[in-house]
Amino acid sequence: KIPSYKIEKIESISGAFQQGKISVIVKNYPESESLLLLCEKIMKEHTEFSNIVICVFSDTEIGQSLAKGNEENIYSEVQLDAWLAMYTYNSVEGTYFDDNPGGYLGAY
């Protein structure tokens, strides 16, 4: 089941390579499978991008701030918990999905 969501921000990273980044906010911390289905749905709806990055954040104050692009120093546990998933797609490498994208940050 696809969770309820709101697209907070759409950025065109590179016009020449049709790269885009979409920031999404979801409610109620859905399961990994639901987040993957959501990302696939959004990717299919945004065919203007051949290379896409989708970042999914929780519907919290911190998650909303991160979705808007206020990503400075995202190392605290609370901030990492607000970043729920990252999805990328391009025709060469295919699909990549990570339901713990902040898990490695601050580990080094």
Image (cartoon, grey):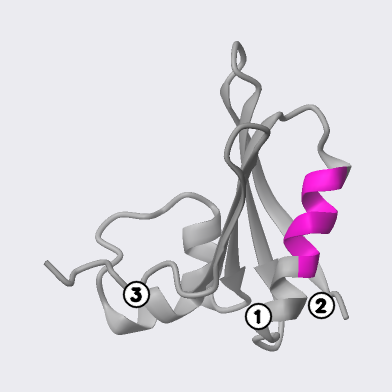
User: Residue at coordinates 41% horizontally, 53% vertically from top-left?
Assistant: 70
Alpha-carbon span between mark 3 and mark 1: 15 Å
Residue 100 screen position, x and y as percent: 46, 74
Tell which of 73 and 106 is nearer to you. 106
User: Badge 2, how many Cα within 10 Å: few under 14, some, many 20+?
Assistant: some
Q: Residue at the far top: name it.
A: 16
Q: Which residues are magenta?
A: 37-44
User: Residue at coordinates 25% horizontally, 70% vertically from top-left?
Assistant: 75
Residue 3 numbered tag = 2
User: Badge 3, how many Cα within 10 Å: few under 14, some, many 20+?
Assistant: some
- The reply, left or right, for residue 77 in relation to residue 15 is left
Q: In the image, is residue 2 part of the stretch drawn in magenta?
A: no
Q: Which secondary structure is most common in the magenta stretch?
A: helix
Q: Is residue 50 above or below residue 74?
A: above
Earlier in the chain: of badge 2 and badge 3, it is 2
Alpha-carbon span between mark 2 and mark 3: 22 Å
Quadrant where the N terminus is found in the figure: bottom right
- Tell me whether the residue at label 3 lies in contact with that at label 1, contact meaning CB atoms closer than 8 angstroms: no
Which secondary structure, mark 2? Answer: loop
Q: Which residue is mark 3?
A: 103
Q: Is residue 27 above or below residue 21?
A: below
Q: Which residue is mark 1?
A: 32
